[in-house]
Amino acid sequence: TAEPCYGSARRWIRDSWTGSAAHRPRKLPRDWLSLATMDAQKHVTNFGAGPAKLPRSVLLEAQKELVDYKGLGISVLEMSHRTSDFSKIIKRAESLLRELLNIPENYKVIFLQGGGSGQFSGIPLNLIGLKEARIADYVVTGSWSAKAAKEAEKYAKVNLVHPKLSSYTKVPDPSTWNLNPDASYIYYCANETIHGVEFDSVPDVGKATLVCDMSSNFLSRPVDVSKFGVIFAGAQKNIGSAGVTVVIVRDDLLGFALKECPIVLDYKVQSENGSLYNTPPCFSIYIVGLVLEWIKNNGGVKAMDKLSQIKSQMIYDIIDNSNGFYVCPVERKSRSRMNVPFRIGSIKGDEALEKKFLDDAVESNMISLKGHRSVGGIRASLYNAVTIEDVQKLSAHMKSFMERHQS
């Protein structure tokens, strides 16, 4: 029996195995068997920090359209970025984003490559020329803002607005920040995924140009975009798959890129070309569009905000009522709703207990709960696509594990 092309895997298997023995295939092709049994696969709950869980409906829609996008006979994976069909995809993604965040008309939305780390360079390369002093203020509250500040030192004089923290467990009081009036911009990371530190509000910096890395809490709460000069976010946590980074930049900040700035990172060039100066990450942008549609259909950013509060509180309540069995090192006011880090047994953690916790979680089909290699412990990432049912499952595991192992 010949292998099928793009028909129904289930129908092919059924027909192949209900015919005469002489016409039955001796061995089913592995890929087609996988497709046919997908619905019967075990449900795995993914608490990964990024790339992270995507909504099930988005995955199924992408699967349905993978080999034949809207009857065109080709996949988005093989579609030219210069076609009217892709133009509709990228414009729809931008339109949805503008609607969900109420982005003012004097802001450009561009889709770039290079991830959030690419913007560690892109920000100073585009903005440090705003003032002659070439100074940039950085608020360092975790590993990612620390890396951003270090990268910026290649292009600017970096002013750390507060003394270096002995540990990343809080957001320093903004009233204590030492801002430089000659700084071209002020940079901060809204949510630190590794250490689980999140700003609970937008810092008031007056008329200074505020830049924010929102990679890990983007679209998880309402944001007044007009308070920012630039917002950027890698898609692979809350709004899509890896490969595309969203940059929202105010019009008056365009055109100041240093001559050393690679043209693919030049905000003015990319905005003038509709993010198509070079070939963009087409499929990743398509997935972003599907996720944005999902967010809109599920109540928008306000609904995501409410769910984030509910989900994170479920985990923090267990930690806080565990009599020290579970310990979150982050000060309560600075606790992240997206990434909940904790140790087991003590503030330093009991590695044997933590390994047992992770092993038991995998046995229950819960994955990617291991803390970042630089800090250890456990980390539960509760992005938009993680459901309340997912968190209830983790909560039950935490309670059960504590009952069995608390002395």
Image (cartoon, helix red, strand yellow):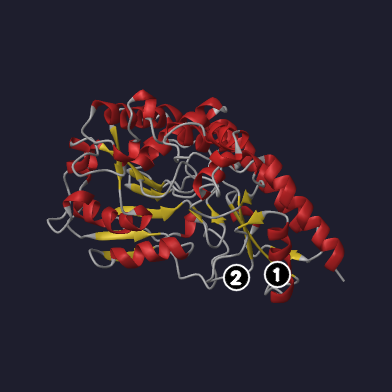
Is any part of residue 183 visible from this angle?
A: no
From the image, tell me which residue sits under label 1.
354
Q: Residue at x 78, y 51 (%)?
A: 396
Q: Residue at x 48, y 55 (%)?
A: 175
Mark 2: give few (<14), some (14-19) or many (20+) Cα within 10 Å: some
Q: Earlier in the sequence, mark 2 or mark 1?
A: 1
Are the two marked residues, 2 and 1, in contact with CB atoms closer than 8 angstroms?
A: yes
In this view of the protein, which residue sits in the foreground, 58 or 267?
58
Which residue is the extreme one toward the left? 259
1 vs 136: above or below: above
Q: Residue at x 51, y 43 (%)?
A: 32
Q: Amino acid at mark 2?
A: Gly
Q: Amino acid at mark 1?
A: Glu
Return the x and y of residue 341 as percentages of the image width and height: 62, 61
Return the x and y of residue 331 as percentages of the image width and height: 63, 60
Return the x and y of residue 127 as percentages of the image width and height: 24, 51
Callout 2: SS:
loop
Measured in 3D between alpha carbons, the distance from the residue under mark 2 to the one under mark 1, in whole angstroms, is 9 Å
From the image, tell me which residue sits under label 2.
376
- Quadrant holding the C terminus: bottom right
Return the x and y of residue 272 as percentages of the image width and height: 18, 36
Left or right of residue 24, residue 239 in this image: left
Left or right of residue 123, residue 29 in this image: right
Mark 1: give few (<14), some (14-19) or many (20+) Cα within 10 Å: many
Q: How many marks?
A: 2
In this view of the protein, which residue sits in the foreground, 147 or 41?
41
